[in-house]
Amino acid sequence: MNHISLGEWKTYARGDMTADNRTFYEQHLYTCDQCMTLYMEAVESIQDEIPIIEEPSYIDEILSKIPFEQNKKISVEKEITKKWHEEKVFHYVLAAAMTFVLMTSGVFSELTNVSTQFEKNQQTHHQSSFTENVLNKTTDLLGRVEQSQKEEANDNE
Ligand SMILES: [Zn+2]
């Protein structure tokens, strides 16, 4: 099996590739633990490049300063929200979900150097608080994606 390099995973995580390549990478990701590790490394290393996901409120702030008509404003907002979810949230949800799976399946520590950090944390914190945290975060993000898709569906009626 030909593996995918860390550099290529960074390109993927940035969303900087064709749909064909993207599909190929995603299929490989589902079947290859080694590349999943690289992929998580890539997501981590480019986090500074990705806008902070917790508070997209700056979008409102920017839009409020632009004298759009009300309809125009809503459609622009939706467009940004949609792109936001498609390009960024997917990677966070996938990474968080996989981290959770790897933590609970116990293979995480064998797969990545990041484990030393997690192991340190586990010595001082109860493990369930970490996994719950990841699960909550994942659920929260999925909820936001669903919400966004619902709004979009309503909009198309
Ligand atoms: Zn691979």
Image (tube, rainbow, N blue to C red):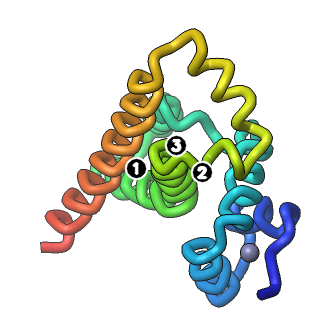
On screen, residue 80 above or below 131: below
Q: Is mark 1 within 8 Å of ligand 1?
A: no
**Residue type at mark 1?**
Glu
**Residue type at mark 2?**
Val
Measure the alpha-carbon separation of dots 3 and 2: 7 Å
Asked if the residue at tag 2 contacts the one at tag 3, i.e. Cβ–Cβ closer than 8 Å, the answer is no
Marks 3 and 2: which is nearer the front? 2
Q: Position of residue 14 (x, y in %)?
A: 71, 59
- Give the residue displayed 42% in from the left and 59% down from the top: 82
- Describe residue 73's horizontal placement relative to residue 66 as left or right: left
On screen, residue 45 above or below 19: above
**Residue type at mark 3?**
Met
Other-residue count near label 1 (Cα within 10 Å), few / some / many at <14 / 14–19 / ≥20: some
Which corner quadrant holds the C terminus?
A: bottom left
Marks 3 and 1: which is nearer the front? 3
Give the camera-side residue of 151 and 11. 11
Which corner quadrant holds the N terminus?
A: bottom right
Badge 3 is on which residue? Answer: 103
Badge 1 is on which residue? Answer: 77
Give the camera-side residue of 125 and 18. 125
Other-residue count near label 2 (Cα within 10 Å), few / some / many at <14 / 14–19 / ≥20: few
Measure the alpha-carbon separation of dots 3 and 1: 37 Å
- Give the residue displayed 77% in from the left and 65% down from the top: 9
Other-residue count near label 3 (Cα within 10 Å), few / some / many at <14 / 14–19 / ≥20: some
Badge 2 is on which residue? Answer: 107
